[in-house]
Image (tube, grey):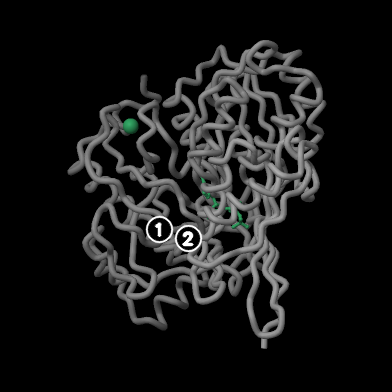
Amino acid sequence: MFWEETFETLPRDQLRSLQSERLKDTLARAAAAPYYRRMYQESGVALDRINGLSDLNRLPFTTKQDLRAGYPFEFLAVDREAVVRLHSSSGTTGQATVVCHNAHDLASWANLMARCMFMTGARPADVFQNMTGYGMFTGGLGFHYGAERLGMLTVPAGAGNSRRQIKFMQDFGATIVHVIPSYALHLLSVFEEAGVDPRRDLRLRIAYLGAEPYSEQTRRRVEEGLGAKVFNSYGLSEMSGPGVAFECPEQNGMHIWEDAFVVEVLNPTTLEPVPEGEEGELVLTSLDREAMPLIRYRTRDLTAILPGPCPCGRTHRRIARIKGRSDDMFIVKGVNVFPLQVETLLMSVPEVGRNYQIILDNEGSLDSMTVQVEVQREFFHGDVKSLKALQQRITTALKGELLFTPKVALVEPDAIPKSDGKAVRVIDRRRKE
Ligand code: ADP
Ligand code: ZN
């Protein structure tokens, strides 16, 4: 049932002592990195006076900007020669940042990933097809080495080339896949075109979906389409990659591994902790990384700590589905909008297909938002009246959610350009004054 029962079920007080101990080690290590050495000198933090978790809030934050300023090796806390791999974030929100690992870091990361997958029921007899990009994107190698560590037959299919993916799944008998949510939806269309019914022709039982925000509605669609159970997977390059938080079979949020990370959820404006159950920004401190420890890293991801113990017996706290990054939010007509709000609504409409995109523009001085929505093929080529009615229905529903009226453009399946990696949900064409 457990990959590492002792660690996964450690009583909370022992977990806290372990965190305190590891935090002190981590701080001592971080002080060897040029960036932190400077930062602690400048901010006058005496590291030897930090006695563990209770002093955490005296430490300055580390931000994405800091990582950029320290690009590429200023955060390195070990000799360059000890580094065995380098990863870089996808650069979704600007210049990429670099994360370095020594052999210990890679081994712990693989172990955490194995822990996550074992928790969902993955076993050595499984055939695991990894359908995300390899290379700099951490989802590829992160899952790959975790799956091998667990002992699964691991198929490094990589991203894209959907027909080949399907053939591999059939030929090698894939039982578990890892796939980005937007690509999972796309894959369902390719199955249809190829005349392959996953429930009939494949042996899939589990799919791991993560790396970008997605709704419960999308989860249900993918589960139905693939005939597999979908588990939510969360991570970020700065904290190695996937393996930070993962759903257990209870699927009541994601356990965040507190023996490897100190977890804070803070009000993004005041930077004070928010009460359990309330949404805030996730701030993480690595506890088991040697080459490049990060202290109080502001992820910008919005989530909440969920109250109460989990019936599965794991003592590590759970976080809610990630709503998005604070910078995913855009403002139209004075209203704050997250793409996930739009997705949740669209994916609950049965006629809606598998992709959508939000286009922001300004006509004169007024902002406008157009939501392009792919609709099911039969429906798109059906009668004009029902298409018009559907457009009206979606517009009204969106207005109910957003409190302003967006434009809704229904388009054919595959009309919206598809990326192999993370989906581009928003195109902002507004001219800034
Ligand atoms: P980039 O920051 O360039 O996108 P990463 O590959 O490191 O590069 O992406 C990590 C980010 O992806 C997280 O900070 C988060 O915003 C998003 N993410 C990862 N997993 C999930 C998930 N399960 N749900 C929602 N968002 C996720
Ligand atoms: Zn659990």
State whether residue 376 appears in this view. Answer: yes
Q: Cβ–Cβ below 8 Å for labels 1 and 2?
A: yes
Q: Ligand 2 is located in which of the four quadrants? A: top left
Ligand 1 lies under 8 Å from the Cβ of mark 2: yes
Q: How many marks?
A: 2
Please report the residue visible at 52 percent of the width from the left and 71 percent of the height from the top. Answer: 34
Q: Residues within 10 Å of mark 1 (few under 14, many from 20)?
A: many
Q: Is residue 54 left or right of residue 209?
A: left
Residue 90 at x, y = what percent?
66, 55
At horizontal 76% and vertical 13% (from top left) the residue drawn is 171
The percent coordinates of residue 105 (x first, y second) are 52, 44
Q: Amino acid at mark 1?
A: Leu
Q: Label 2's element?
A: strand
Q: Residue at x 70, y 41 (%)?
A: 375
As displayed, is residue 65 above or below residue 427?
Answer: below
Position of 433 compared to 335: left or right? right
Residue identifier under label 1: 282
Q: Quadrant of residue 210?
A: top right
- Point 78% across, 31% down: residue: 162
Front residue of this view, candidates 354 and 365: 365
Location of mark 2 (residue): 299
Above or below, 146 against 340 in this view is above
The quadrant of the image that shows the C terminus is bottom right
Question: x%, y% of residue 62?
Answer: 46, 68
From this view, report whether residue 209 is shown above or below residue 120.
below
Q: Nearer the viewer, residue 281 or 34?
A: 281
- The amino acid on which the numbered mark 2 sits, given as a three-letter code, is Thr
Q: Is residue 240 visible?
A: no
Residue 254: x percent and y percent? 40, 40
Q: Is residue 64 left or right of residue 31?
A: right
Helix, strand, or loop for circle 1?
strand
